[in-house]
Image (cartoon, rainbow, N blue to C red):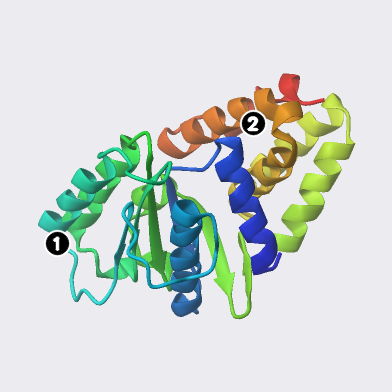
């Protein structure tokens, strides 16, 4: 999946009302991650991915900060919980979230567990292992590689999985979910699968709005609670045509 495709997915997420409250962008090229953040901030506020010099009212892009302490993170919460001025969302992004100290990550976790209705939080980082595993579990995760962007290294496999899922009947879909969740530790595809499926369903929100609404709700539960992923995903099947 290249950057243009992921941009289309994010457009569908916004238009379909299924944009997650938190994303972690990770991979070796943090500058490419940050460029995407800046472009997305412009898209949310101006309707265009082109970066310009106009000051953004509803975006706070945190870079060139040596260390993120708990006091600064608390100010993030204050910003995100305010109502947007121009956009439909308030976006706060942190460049190189590995600089978040232990207390700051705990404060960030509280934001992720009680997300503001119109707030979107994006963390960028080279190594996702630098972040608290509990914090990581509360965010949707997107892997960036040089020149391309994919939800993980398993991007192509995830796309094929989604295509097989949509072309199958209810029994085949249930079996696919069961197998995917069973192998999650060895081959972590669930996050990627859900994000790709959301993007595909959001291409026709009039037709798929019930499934999108349910999938979004179930995905939030999966990220915030230690719940059975198979049962959560299977609960969406009745809403899929």
150 over 219 or under it: above or below: below
Q: Nearer the viewer, residue 192 or 132?
A: 192
**Mark 1 residue crowding within 10 angstroms, few (<14) / some (14–19) / many (20+):** some
Q: Which mark is residue 203?
A: none
Residue depth check, mark 2 versus mark 1: number of the one nearer the observer: 2
Q: Earlier in the sequence, mark 2 or mark 1?
A: 1
233 over 50 or under it: above or below: above
Residue 175 image point, x, y percent: 79, 33
As drawn, is 166 to the left or to the right of 30? right
89 over 52 or under it: above or below: above
Residue 166 image point, x, y percent: 83, 38
Residue 30 image point, x, y percent: 44, 76
As drawn, is 61 to the left or to the right of 159? left
Using the rendered image of the protein, determine whether residue 118 is visible from the camera's viewpoint: yes
Marks 2 and 1 in Cβ contact (< 8 Å): no
Which quarter of the picture shows residue 142? bottom right
Going by the picture, which residue comes out furthest to the left? 71
Residue 214 image point, x, y percent: 60, 25
Report the residue at 47% width, 71% height from top: 51
Q: Which mark is residue 69?
A: 1
**Mark 2 residue crowding within 10 angstroms, few (<14) / some (14–19) / many (20+):** many
Q: Secondary structure at mark 2?
A: helix
Find the distance from the CA under tag 2 to the CA under tag 1. Answer: 37 Å
Using the rendered image of the protein, determine whether residue 154 is visible from the camera's viewpoint: no
Mark count: 2
Report the residue at 81% width, 39% height from top: 165
Q: Which mark is residue 212?
A: 2
Q: Secondary structure at mark 1?
A: loop
């Amino acid at each position: 999946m290249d950057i243009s495709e992921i941009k289309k997915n994010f457009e569908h997420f916004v238009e379909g009302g299924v944009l997650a409250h938190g994303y972690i962008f990770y991979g070796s090229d943090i500058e490419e991650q940050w460029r995407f953040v800046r472009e997305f901030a412009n898209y949310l506020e101006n309707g265009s991915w082109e970066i310009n010099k106009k000051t953004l009212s509803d975006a706070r892009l945190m870079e060139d900060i040596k260390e993120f302490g708990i006091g600064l993170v608390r100010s993030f919460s204050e910003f995100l919980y305010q109502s947007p001025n121009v956009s439909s969302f308030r976006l706060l992004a942190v460049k190189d979230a590995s600089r978040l100290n232990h207390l700051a990550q705990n404060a960030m976790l509280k934001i992720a567990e009680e997300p503001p209705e119109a707030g979107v939080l994006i963390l960028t980082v080279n190594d996702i292992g630098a972040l608290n595993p509990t914090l990581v579990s509360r965010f949707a995760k997107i892997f960036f590689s040089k020149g391309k962007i994919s939800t993980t290294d398993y991007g192509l496999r995830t796309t094929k999985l989604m295509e097989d899922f949509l072309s199958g009947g209810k029994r085949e879909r249930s079996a696919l979910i069961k197998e995917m969740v069973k192998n999650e530790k060895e081959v972590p595809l669930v996050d990627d699968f859900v994000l790709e499926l959301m993007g595909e369903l959001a291409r026709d929100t009039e037709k798929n709005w019930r499934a999108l609404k349910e999938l979004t709700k179930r995905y939030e539960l999966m990220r915030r609670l230690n719940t059975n992923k198979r049962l959560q995903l299977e609960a969406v099947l009745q809403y899929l045509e």
